[in-house]
Image (tube, rainbow, N blue to C red):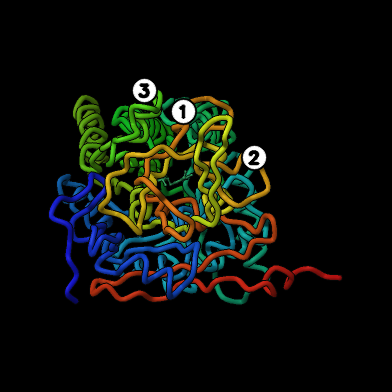
Amino acid sequence: MSSRVAAISPAWAIPGYLEVANGHLSINGADAIELVREYDSPLFVFSAPRIRSNIRRLQRAAETVEKPIRFFYASKANSNMAVLKTVRDSGIDVEVNSGGELFKALKVGFRPDQIIFNGTSKSDEELDQAVSAGIYAINVDSIYEIGLVEAAVKRLRERESEPLPPARITLRLVPEIGTRSHLGLQTALLTSKFGISSSEVSEAFRRGLQHPELINVCGIHIHVGSQTPDVEPFAEAFRSMWEHLLTIHRETGHTLEHINLGGGIPVNYLRDRTQADQLPEHERDMLGADLEPAAVLTAALRIARESAREVAAEHLLDKVTILLEPGRSVIADAGLVLTTVRNIKRRPETGDVWLLTDAGYNLMLSMNNYKWYYHLISASSAEALASENYKVAGPLCDSGDVYFDIERGGRLPDYRLLPENVKPGEVLALLNSGAYSLAQMFHYNGRPLPAAVMIQEDGTAELIRRRDTYEDLVTNDVW
Ligand SMILES: Cc1ncc(COP(=O)(O)O)c(C=O)c1O
């Protein structure tokens, strides 16, 4: 391929992955415009090399601490089968949030002992599936749920002739730890719907240890939230879990095998900061966070080591494996959405130029409900200076389907900067949109869901999700 890679690379570029070649956006050497020509628009594009390098970054972080660390990819971030396969082949484990995600994880080839099941409202069927598969841990979300897992074990033992070992459970705690992320993405607050509060922990453990023939309480879990920009909440969560582990050991003699620190390692959505100054400071700090996973692990372990030394409990810490459930940090910047400008209008009264694209919030729900910032570039003129202000909007029949904050909360810039003279037919790219997008997309307005491709190391594209047809819109309707 005689592609000409731009000499000056834009701020959003990631060498070897996101570049400009022949004036176009290039993804691991695949030309974005060619991809749209072949697979149509809108189109999700994922990079297998980027997923692998994100996972390697986590694995390298694990090597910096002298402790066994296991990563369980949070499949809610993106559970496309090809994505799961790439994650599995990279050698890490998986976290699921429903019977459906459990089904997908098993189907793609994760072993049961590589799977953790989280969730606030698991059904009996889902618990039966998890228990009978013999997964690594079911993270129980309340004292009540402990009884549900026990009931599932009893039910299955009656039903199946095979002997069934006790189910492994982890207690999910909610210790009131705030973060500087969106309120909707904070999950360790007492006002959130998650987990068992600190005042209930002793009772929860007593209850969990009542029937060792049915369940084995093997760990403790806290997920402080997603896109957590600072190290402190992780360290605080680890301290809390470690102290509970010590108390439980002192009170019952029971030793926990693992401490699960959840997900939440942030992604830098503001690699290109040209529009960052239009965002409120706290939003900028959160979206532009550049927190190394190694820093999270080091800070958490330092606290536990000091505490272990003080109370002569190093032997307990030595036995503990640390688990992390990264989602966003694996897949967000490994995916983007290509969208085509379908319509253009200039409002005489305001002078605004409106670009109407084919990618609405039905493809990126976070852009609507959290006003999440995805940096927008021109994939057709990737080299050109982004010097003009445009109002940008999607195709949905909803005035909230816009790429700015319609409520004027300032959480998204009012205008998007793109090159001058953008015309219908031009392809744009919403960067860093690989997490919580494809997994959350929906058919609103009867819009068939888009295709997705995965780019391999050599620049070849593989279809990993076929585009819906109109028939797909009616397959489940009964009339
Ligand atoms: C329990 C749990 N673990 C892991 C994650 C993944 O978080 P992130 O994608 O921010 O890494 C989430 C998502 O919020 C979660 O709820």
Question: On screen, 321 above or below 447?
Answer: above
Q: Nearer the viewer, residue 444 or 124?
A: 444
Q: Nearer the viewer, residue 205 or 13?
A: 13
On the picture, is 473 further left or further right than 23? right
On the picture, is 169 further left or further right than 147? left
Q: Which residue is mark 3?
A: 281
In the rendered structure, are the residues bearing label 1 and label 2 in contact, judged by CB atoms less than 8 Å apart? Answer: no
Q: Which residue is mark 2?
A: 399
The image position of residue 210, as x and y in percent, is: 55, 44
Mark 3 residue crowding within 10 angstroms, few (<14) / some (14–19) / many (20+): few
Q: CA distance from mark 1 to mark 2?
A: 39 Å
For the residue labelled by badge 2, is the local secondary structure a helix, a strand or a loop? loop
Question: On screen, 27 above or below 172?
Answer: below
Q: CA distance from mark 3 to mark 1?
A: 27 Å
Question: On screen, 298 above or below 438?
Answer: above
Q: Residue at x 36, y 49 (%)?
A: 377
For badge 1, the amino acid type reads: Pro
Residue 56: name its quadrant: bottom left
Mark 1 residue crowding within 10 angstroms, few (<14) / some (14–19) / many (20+): many
For badge 3, the amino acid type reads: Glu
Q: Nearer the viewer, residue 224 or 149?
A: 224
